[in-house]
């Protein structure tokens, strides 16, 4: 369909985040006309407004403030360090505005992609109404993202709670913060505010924090966070939340007894729900999963011809990178007739605590569940020369390999630089490299990334009896 005026498009996109932008840009590159209809978060969606960008800014600001109070090297004497917390929030807001303008608004203007700030509602497989306008498209892409999930806990609504969205808007730092959820978001915010000076308690319902990661990863990060004074309770069952005399009182048990929990505020970080309200999906006949997310096939097609979906609203991996990739592929598939998808087993993921957590591929348990037989090795970062040199030996690396071919199927890291280290492992898995391939690759010395090679070497050697120049 040629670029023409009026309200007829090749692709009508519902949403304004990563998946929506990637789809619109791909459509523009392919020579097709698209429109983005967005009524949710400001332009750019979760990542730039209330997710990756602002949270990582505050995490790094908190890191600098916290760790400068206890320098790593004895030659650097500790001194008085002050933090202007309201200014940290103001700095975060200015950065978000700058990136929203430069990375999103100006991109639309340069590419002449139409953007409509309004609520969109499906009328049929190819028609969308937004306020008084009717948009007709050869294809429609649902990319409306997700929002924080609020569990049905007795008294929670009445007591009042915070989410990552509302907490980062507040210029007052709570003296005591209770965090519901020991997943990536909950742990990042727990450490962020602990570093700024809040007393923080984390309640996680599973047997360990980061329950989808390797047990060794969870155990190492638990130890690191507890050493910094963060209280962590697992197997927690929250029965009720009350606000008494201005304080949050949480009734919770952990199988052993009652967990006494009081705080100034409570942060809910217990997952997300899809943004599907008001889209008229049920009336249109768009199928949903049992969790309420938009159901698609591997090529991002819904059950209705002409309607596609990508990003968090589909309930796959809740990552900005995945949403953007899905959006671009959905645009290519819908407009060019391609049939491309993502191998989700090869997508790296990271938790930006300090130390960081990063993983790619399968865990030991998942590989076995799928019928594979594997060998695993775990090496502590205290064996890595660079970690010893800089005096930061926090962390572990677990390598999972097929027991017959010794092809890598998973790498899981806790390290101050884990999020950067994981890409070497991602390339290795994508290239189907073996343990021997890693050993035969000469690494730069000394680096944290050598931990990947040391883990590979540990399949054949006792690393406690090897020098740091092992080849």
Image (tube, grey):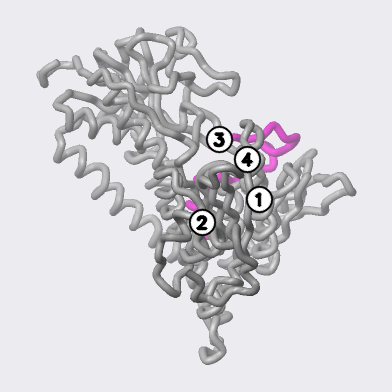
Q: Is residue 16 left or right of residue 279?
A: left
Label pair 2/1, CB-CB below 8 angstroms: no
Label pair 4/1, CB-CB below 8 angstroms: no
Q: Which residue in the protein does label 1 denote?
A: 179
Residue at 55% from the left image edge and 21% from the top image edge? 292
> Disc 2 or 3, which lies upstream in sequence?
3
Say if 327 sits above or below 11 in the image.
below
Q: Which residue in the protein does label 3 denote?
A: 272
> Disc 2 or 4, which lies upstream in sequence?
4
Element at label 2: loop
Camera-side residue of 93 and 35: 35
Specify the farthest residue to the right.
257
Is residue 149 in the magenta section?
Answer: yes
Camera-side residue of 393 and 428: 428
Camera-side residue of 365 and 22: 365
How far apart marks 2 and 1 lie (CA) works out to 17 Å
Say if 124 sits above or below 441 in the image.
above
Residue at 44% from the left image edge and 19% from the top image edge? 297
Q: Which residue in the protein does label 4 denote?
A: 270
Label pair 4/3, CB-CB below 8 angstroms: no
Q: Which residue in the protein does label 2 denote?
A: 352
How far apart marks 4 and 1 lie (CA) works out to 9 Å
- Which residues make up the magenta segment? 148-172
Expressed as whole percent of the image width and height from the top left, the position of residue 310 reads 40, 27
Expressed as whole percent of the image width and height from the top left, the position of residue 132 reads 28, 16
Residue 174 appears in the rendering: yes
Camera-side residue of 310 and 100: 310
């Amino acid at each position: 369909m040629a670029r023409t005026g009026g309200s007829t498009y090749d692709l009508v996109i519902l949403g304004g985040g990563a998946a929506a932008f990637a789809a619109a840009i791909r459509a523009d590159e392919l020579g097709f006309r698209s429109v983005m209809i967005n009524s949710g978060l400001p332009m750019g969606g979760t990542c730039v407004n209330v997710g990756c960008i602002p949270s990582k800014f505050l995490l790094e600001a908190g890191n600098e403030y916290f760790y400068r109070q206890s320098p790593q090297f004895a030659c650097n004497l500790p001194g008085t360090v002050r933090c202007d917390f309201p200014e940290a929030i103001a700095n975060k807001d200015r950065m978000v505005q700058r990136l929203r303008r430069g990375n999103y608004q100006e991109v639309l203007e340069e590419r002449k992609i139409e953007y409509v700030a309004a609520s969109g509602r499906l009328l049929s497989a190819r028609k969308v109404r937004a306020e008084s306008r009717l948009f007709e498209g050869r294809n429609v892409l649902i990319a409306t993202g997700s929002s924080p999930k609020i569990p049905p806990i007795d008294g929670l609504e009445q007591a009042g709670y915070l989410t990552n969205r509302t907490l980062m808007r507040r210029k007052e730092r709570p003296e005591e913060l209770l965090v519901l959820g020991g997943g990536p978001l909950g742990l990042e915010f727990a450490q962020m505010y602990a570093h700024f000076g809040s007393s923080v308690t984390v309640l996680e319902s599973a047997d360990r924090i980061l329950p989808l990661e390797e047990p060794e990863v969870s155990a190492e990060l638990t130890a690191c966070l507890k050493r910094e004074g963060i209280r962590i309770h697992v197997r927690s069952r929250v029965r009720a939340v009350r606000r008494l005399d201005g304080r949050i009182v949480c009734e919770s048990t952990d199988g052993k007894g009652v967990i006494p929990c009081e705080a100034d505020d409570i942060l809910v970080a217990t997952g997300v729900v899809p943004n599907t309200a008001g889209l008229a999906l049920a009336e249109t006949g768009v199928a949903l999963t049992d969790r309420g997310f938009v159901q698609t096939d591997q090529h991002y097609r819904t059950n209705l011809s002409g309607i596609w979906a990508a990003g968090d609203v589909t309930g796959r991996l809740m990552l900005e990178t995945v949403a953007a990739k899905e959006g671009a592929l959905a645009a290519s598939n819908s407009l060019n007739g391609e049939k491309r998808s993502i191998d989700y087993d090869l997508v790296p993921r990271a938790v930006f605590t300090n130390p960081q957590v990063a993983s790619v591929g399968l865990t030991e348990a998942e590989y076995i569940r799928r019928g594979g037989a594997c060998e695993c090795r775990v090496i502590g970062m205290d064996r890595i020369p660079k970690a010893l040199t800089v005096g930061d030996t926090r962390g572990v690396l677990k390598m999972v390999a097929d027991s017959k071919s010794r092809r890598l199927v998973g790498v899981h890291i806790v390290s101050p630089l884990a999020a950067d280290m994981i890409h070497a492992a991602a390339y290795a898995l994508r290239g189907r490299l073996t343990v021997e391939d890693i050993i035969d690759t000469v690494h730069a010395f000394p680096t944290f990334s050598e931990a990947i090679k040391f883990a590979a070497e540990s399949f054949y050697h006792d690393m406690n009896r090897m020098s740091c120049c092992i080849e």
